[in-house]
Each structure stands twice: as structure tokens, then as C-alpha cells.
Image (tube, grey):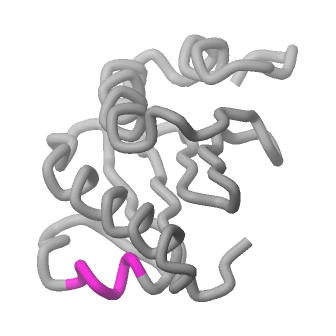
Amino acid sequence: MAATRPTTIAEYIEAAPEAGQPHLRRLYEVLKNVASDAEEAIKWGAPFFVEPRFLFSFSAHKAHLNVALTPATLEAFREEMGGYRTTANFLQVRYDQPLPEDLIRQMAEHRCQAVLQRDDDGFW
């Protein structure tokens, strides 16, 4: 990442490793389409979508990106994640892997629905 801290998601993506920028741009489009009315912000050094609570965020790393969707959302899609690495809080996609756009879209929609129904597992 660049020495100056980005203040917008576009700046964040521009400062990310060049190899990941295509994935990050497409990921941003997918998340923006799902949550078009959500507030976008850089929090804790990463892009966040908030409406009114945390919806999801993502982060760029040297060789991969992480998508944060909440543990409950990740668990709901555990079987569909196949060869992608996960932790309790993140779906990790290496830049040399295809971006699972449909899966991320479904997961983001699931997360938005959980927030609307106030069934959001108290995450952030």
C-alpha cells in the first residue's frame, strides 16, 4: 500500500498491489451493486460498506484479497466456497484464482438481508 492513506475506495484500490487491482475493482462493483445505498468508508485501513451497521468490507494484500462478511454469513455458504481459503471472518481469494463473483454476490445479499431482519449475529 502507498505511504499516504487512502480516503476513498477508489484510492484504496489504486494503492493496492497491481496484480490484485482487477479483482478489487470487480469485487467493489459486485458489492456496490448489492448495497448501492450503503455508506462507503475507509475504516481501520480497509474499505467498508455500512447501512446502518457493518455489512461487509474487503482488504488487499500482497498475493490475495480478503472479503469480510461475518462468521454467520460465511458459515451459511461453507459448502459453496470450495477451493477458497476461509477463516472465521474472511473469504480469501488469491489473485491467481478466479473471483467467485456469483458466490460473493449471494453472500453479500444474504448479509444485507440479515441486517434488514436484525438477524446479524451482533457483528460490528
Q: Which residues are magenta?
A: 73-78
Q: Residue at x 52, y 35 (%)?
A: 37
Q: Relative to the observer, which residue lies in front, 7 or 115? A: 115
Left/right of residue 108 with respect to residue 123 in the rendered view: left
Q: Relative to the observer, which residue lies in front, 50 or 64? A: 50
Indicate whether 21 appears above or below 50.
above
Q: Relative to the observer, which residue lies in front, 112 or 22? A: 112
Query: Which x, y percent locates residue 33?
Result: 33, 33
Which quadrant of the figure has residue 123?
A: bottom right
Q: Residue at x 42, y 33 (%)?
A: 32
**Would residue 97 be seen by someone viewing this image from the given angle?**
no
- Residue ranking furthest to the right: 4
**Would residue 103 be seen by someone viewing this image from the given angle?**
yes
Query: Which x, y percent locates residue 73?
Result: 39, 77
Q: Magenta stretch containing residue 52, yes or no?
A: no
Indicate whether 53 appears above or below 33.
below
